Image (cartoon, rainbow, N blue to C red):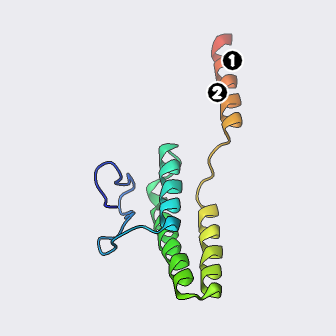
Amino acid sequence: MTNDDETAPTLPGLEYVPENQAGVSPMRAAVIATIQALEADALLEPRHVAMCQLALELADAVTAGRRSGRASAAAMAAGQLRDTLLALPAPIAGDIAQRFADFVDSLRDDE
């Protein structure tokens, strides 16, 4: 997987797949999908680049820990990855977003 125009992140400085990395682990792919979903919802700002990059690096650390057979290393990296992902903006639940949109529409109807 390479950073072509379709998969290039919109956040400057974020590198989904390092140039020296041939493939993407399932964990990194999952983190990429999470970041892309947050980007699509316009929840990420340039100030989030470091946290996103950290999440990608931690995904690699989880994979490396699993490959080396060191369960404790994989578990520690997984915990840090979870904490990093939780530090990113949370998407608004669909029903809440819809209720808010309905509320805004009702305000417009009253005008």
**Relative height, residue 63 to residue 30 (above, below):** below
**Relative height, residue 73 to residue 48 (above, below):** below
Q: Residue at x 50, y 81 (%)?
A: 64
Nearer-the-camera pick, 100 or 85? 85
Image spot of residue 35 (x, y percent): 50, 56
| Figure quadrant of residue 70 | bottom right
Q: Is residue 94 left or right of residue 40?
A: right
Per the image, the residue denoted by label 2 is 101
Q: Quadrant of the C terminus?
A: top right
Per the image, the residue denoted by label 1 is 106
Q: Amino acid at mark 1?
A: Ser
User: How many dots with numbers?
Assistant: 2
Image spot of residue 86 (x, y percent): 64, 62
Q: Quadrant of the N terminus?
A: bottom left
Q: Is residue 7 left or right of residue 59?
A: left
**Relative height, residue 66 to residue 35 (above, below):** below
Earlier in the chain: of badge 2 and badge 1, it is: 2
Image spot of residue 107 (x, y percent): 67, 18
Report, in whole angstroms, how far the alpha carbon at label 2 lies from the one at label 1: 9 Å
Nearer-the-camera pick, 109 or 101? 101
